[in-house]
Amino acid sequence: MNKNDKSKTYEYAIYIGRFQPFHQGHLACVHEGLKIANRIIILIGSVNQPRSQKNPWDYKERRRMVRASFCKEQNQRIAIAGVRDYNDDRKWIKSIKTTVNRITQMGSDSIVLIGHIRDDSSYYLENFPNWDLVELPEYQTINATQIRKQILAAGDIQSVTRPVADKIRHFINSNTFKALVNNTPTNNTCPAILDGTLDAI
């Protein structure tokens, strides 16, 4: 694994996250990925988790947030796929590799993993030794947990793009949001999403 070589151009950059919600820090990471790779694969995690205050938006809603944050030309270079959570790191790593192989048509020798190492939860970035790694700096100390808390507590939307803010405002007006605020069960269970569910380039 080579680290932090931004001078190299790759065929694919891989960016993994929950994107709850997709915010300006995520946006900055994707822009960096587009600088060093011809295409970027965004893997949206936790697609098998039901709605909760930790995971308010389902896979399709988060995918729409991502797509709405980029212009047509940029979206043509972006592939998005959903990935499940596993209680076994080996299964999770295998699902990531399988999804990437599917998108890249059985693999590429020109792949870089990008991401910000925030804390111990970022250990997964070291689990793909066959891919180069570019560690990206934190962007304006933006924190998705704090963004969610502000939204759920007061409907206060901060640190997201205007299209994402519009989608969140629509969500705030829904019964689903009201149920989440009250921390009560909803009828909106997680849709059946398979690993590698693909919104392709």
Image (cartoon, rainbow, N blue to C red):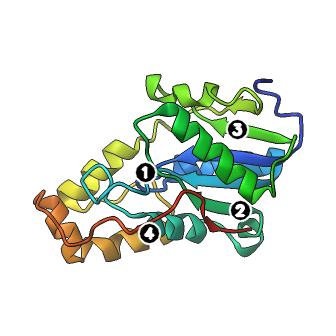
Q: What residue is pinned by disc 3?
A: 113
In front here: 143 or 58? 58
Q: What residue is pinned by disc 4?
A: 61
| Image quadrant occupied by the C terminus | bottom right
Which badge, 4 or 3, is on the more N-terminal residue?
4
In the image, 44: left or right of 46?
Answer: right
Q: What residue is pinned by disc 2?
A: 78
The residue under label 2 is which amino acid type?
Answer: Ile
User: In terms of secondary structure, where does tag 2 sit?
Assistant: strand
Point 57% across, 71% down: residue: 68
Mark 1, Cα crowd under 10 Å, few <14 / some 14-19 / many 20+, is some
Quote the CA–CA distance across marks 1 and 2. 20 Å
| Image quadrant occupied by the N terminus | top right
Is residue 71 at all visible to an observer of this figure?
Answer: yes
The residue under label 1 is which amino acid type?
Answer: Ser
From the viewer's perspective, is the residue at label 1 or at label 3 nearer?
1
In front here: 190 or 67? 190
Point 69% across, 62% down: residue: 79
User: In terms of secondary structure, where does tag 4 sit?
Assistant: helix
Which badge, 3 or 2, is on the more N-terminal residue?
2
> Where does the image place residue 192, in percent across and percent down from the top left?
41, 67
Quote the CA–CA distance across marks 4 and 3. 24 Å
Q: What residue is pinned by disc 1?
A: 46
In the image, 159: left or right of 91?
Answer: left
Mark 1 and mark 2 residues within 8 Å of each other at the beta carbon: no
The residue under label 4 is which amino acid type?
Answer: Glu
In the image, 175: left or right of 76?
Answer: left
The residue under label 3 is which amino acid type?
Answer: Leu
